[in-house]
Image (tube, rainbow, N blue to C red):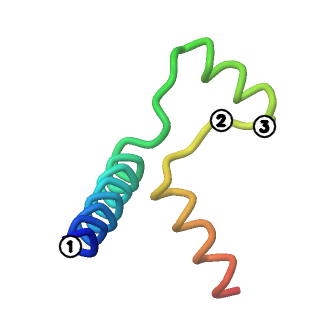
Amino acid sequence: MQSIEAGVRVIAIGLERWLMLERFQQDGMLGTSKDVAEMTTLRGRPLRSYADFAKETLAQWQG
């Protein structure tokens, strides 16, 4: 019985992480306007979506 419970926990944790990653990819990192301003200042450029990051990275890899 313990091995079944352990397996269910592993599946539940995997599903939770998958859902968190999916939400992050869809919405990006959501923060307050103060958070966005601070991160923009620290990075020296506007923030971008994950999709834009992925496209830029792919373009760099393709040369």
Comparing 50 with 46, the one in front is: 50
Query: Circle 1 — which element?
Result: helix
Q: Amino acid at mark 3?
A: Arg
Left or right of 10 in this view: 41: right
The spot of residue 41 in percent (x, y) is 78, 25
Q: Secondary structure at mark 3?
A: helix
Closer to the camera in the image, 23 or 14: 14
Tell me the quadrant of the picture where the N terminus can be found. bottom left
When the figure is inspected, residue 46 is found, relative to residue 58, above or below; the finding is above
Mark 1 belongs to which amino acid? Ile
Q: Position of residue 11 (x, y in %)?
A: 27, 67
Q: Are marks 2 and 1 in contact (CB under 8 Å)?
A: no
Pinpoint residue 33: horizontal percent, then vertical percent: 54, 14
What number of labels is visible?
3
Q: Is residue 45 above or below residue 36?
A: below
Residue 46's label in the rendered image is 2
User: Of the residues tagged 1 and 3, which is closer to the observer?
Assistant: 1
| Horizontal arrangement in the rendering, residue 53 relative to residue 24 (left or right) | right
Q: Which residue is mark 3?
A: 43
- Tell me the residue that label 1 is attached to: 4
